[in-house]
Image (cartoon, helix red, strand yellow):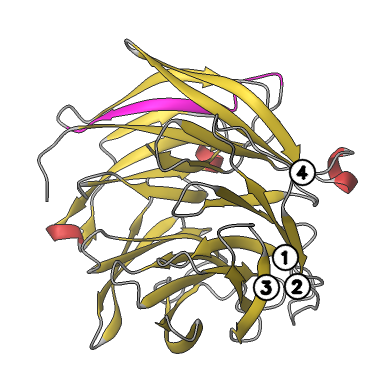
Amino acid sequence: MSSYGTASFFVGSYGPADGPGIYAFTLDESRSELRLRGAFAGVRNPSFLTLHPTGNHLFVVSETGLGSDGTGGAVHAFRIDRGYGEIDLVPLNHRPTAGDHPCHLSVDADGRWLVVSNYGTGNVAVFPILADGSLGEMATAVQHSGSGPHVDRQEAPHAHSSIFTPDNQFLIVADLGIDRLVTYAFDGATGSLARHREVTARPGAGPRHLAFHPNGRHLFVVNELENSITLFQRDAEAGSLRQLQTVSTLPPRAPENLAADIHVSASGKHVYASNRGHDSLAVSSFDPASGLNPIVVRSCGGTGPRSFGIAPGGRHLLVANRYSDEVALLPLLAEGADIGEPIARAPVSQPSCIAFV
């Protein structure tokens, strides 16, 4: 692992449009400090955010819907300006997402396209990223259909996240509502999506978020409703996925829970997932030959861990504990095989997403 250093990160939240909802911080690992460097208003429910590969632009959803808020979802583009001791966000533009309650964003490897997953309406939209970081007119959108066995949560499709394959040739969409991972062939010239293949999860699993192993051959999916992680093997040439294994994110006799986020260590040796309800982080080891092996489940340091991030260098985790209104800094121990108690906290109202620059 690298030496201790500093890193900047942004936090999204369920904040109002007329109050702070997006926050910029610096993590000083040598002092175990979280320093607020900016707080920004103007976006309602900026619950998920992601950065351009250059680190110079930030994209943020406005998680709203016609039925609940009187307006459909939107995505906002910002330029990041860095000054001495401060970070500023300059609004560029925003676009409607052609759906309700957008909850996830992905940028392709070339930094030319932004994909928005609309949970409420079960569709995915693609937008061009222009030279100045603003968003062009929507290039394409795809709509899912169907339902699942969970009456309350799977009454319709719910596209919860999308991820580009490492070769940038395909987009994989996790749809919680229909228990499917849908793979689309991606055209990097036009931004178009063509339905290619799909794989069905276990009935009622509710696939939510996805993370690739550094080798690009293995994909991990956290299942929100089943509280599990499923391991898939990817055939890059065929653009297909083969299910290999599923493990629980919870210890025995755990309370009612909804799994949330998933990340893989830079070494590829460990996989982490968050649990809302049990309020914990699950750690599993991974070996391409033997698969996933659950190791420990540790406290997240608060309540409602909706999202988390691994700090550059792999020494710490930052957790967005929504219901305790704070971001918690936790050390990674035993070369990433364990998680310690919180060593720093920063107050944030209803934090929901963390993105390192």
- Residue located beneath label 2 in the image: 154
- Distance Cα–Cα, label 2 vs label 1: 8 Å
Kind of residue at badge 1: His
Q: Nearer the viewer, mark 2 or mark 1?
A: 1
Q: Is residue 26 magenta?
A: yes
Q: Is residue 353 visible?
A: yes
- Distance Cα–Cα, label 4 vs label 3: 23 Å
Kind of residue at badge 2: Gln
Q: Nearer the viewer, mark 1 or mark 3?
A: 3
Q: Nearer the viewer, mark 2 or mark 4?
A: 4
64 relative to 126 in the view: left or right: right
- Residue located beneath label 3 in the image: 194
Would you place residue 47 above or below residue 106 in this image? Answer: above
Q: Earlier in the sequence, mark 2 or mark 4?
A: 4
Q: Tags 2 and 4 in contact by the CB under 8 Å rule?
A: no
Q: Nearer the viewer, residue 197 or 314?
A: 197
Q: For the point 39% across and 68% down, which residue is it?
A: 212
- Distance Cα–Cα, label 2 vs label 4: 20 Å
Instruction: Give me the disc on residue 73.
Output: 4
Kind of residue at badge 3: Ala
Looking at the picture, how far across and down is residue 159, in whole percent?
68, 64
Tell me where the magenta segment starts and ends, as one range. 18-29
Looking at the picture, how far across and down is residue 169, in whole percent?
50, 69
Q: Tags 2 and 1 in contact by the CB under 8 Å rule?
A: yes
Instruction: Give me the disc on residue 158.
Output: 1
Q: Earlier in the sequence, mark 4 or mark 3?
A: 4
Q: Earlier in the sequence, mark 4 or mark 1?
A: 4
